Image (cartoon, rainbow, N blue to C red):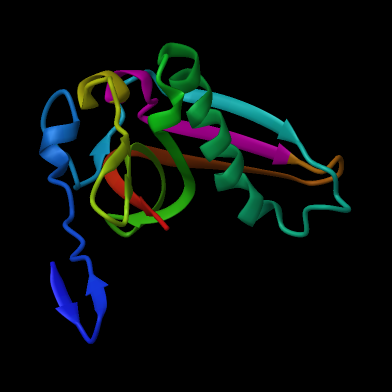
Amino acid sequence: MATLAGCSSLVSTDPDPENHVPDEWHDEPNRGLADPRDVTEDVDPDEIYDLDIECPYAAGRAALEPVHAQLDDLENVGGAGCCAEIDGREAVVIERVIFANRDGSVGSSPSFTFQTLREATPRTVTATVSDGSNEHTCEVPVFNEDVMVFAG
């Protein structure tokens, strides 16, 4: 701790994420391993102005459903959902999350392995969205990644 003109300054240290997961840290996207999913979603045409844009978001919501159904520790699952660009394509990302404070203390960390998350995550989601008169279908790959989120 350094003291300057009567004020103290705490130096923030970032926690090592490897110490807060039950396996290894994965900060590069890895493809989900579960069977692909298909979803059809009707949307309100007054709320959705572009089905092309809404379609990957519907895929993101559908990708989270089996993850939420299979894992008990939902506090540490982040639904970044859509849309990330991975390998030049629009993709869904579901994250395993460590929550840390600015002082470096960890408030919450996942109890499940990265492999468990990947096995619950579909490889792809094919979503069809319809506003009653128009329809759009998209196929979106789904990935997993580890992230650390710092709270203020």
Q: Position of residue 148 (x, y in %)?
A: 29, 47
126 left or right, relative to 45: left
Residue at screen point 52% across, 33% down: 126
Query: Which quarter of the rendered picture does the C terminus lie within?
Result: bottom left
Query: Which quarter of the rendered picture does the N terminus lie within?
Result: bottom left
11 left or right, relative to 130: left
Q: Please count the marks in the image.
A: 0
6 left or right, relative to 65: left
Position of residue 111 relative to residue 42, above or below, is: above
Q: Is 127 colored magenta in this rendering?
A: yes
| 85 vs 4, nearest the viewer | 4
* Magenta stretch, residue numbers: 118-129
Position of residue 38 relative to residue 88, above or below, is: above
The image quadrant that residue 106 belongs to is top left
Q: Is 61 colored magenta in this rendering?
A: no
Q: Position of residue 81 (x, y in %)?
A: 48, 43
Residue at screen point 55% across, 25% down: 38
The image quadrant that residue 80 belongs to is top left
40 left or right, relative to 83: right
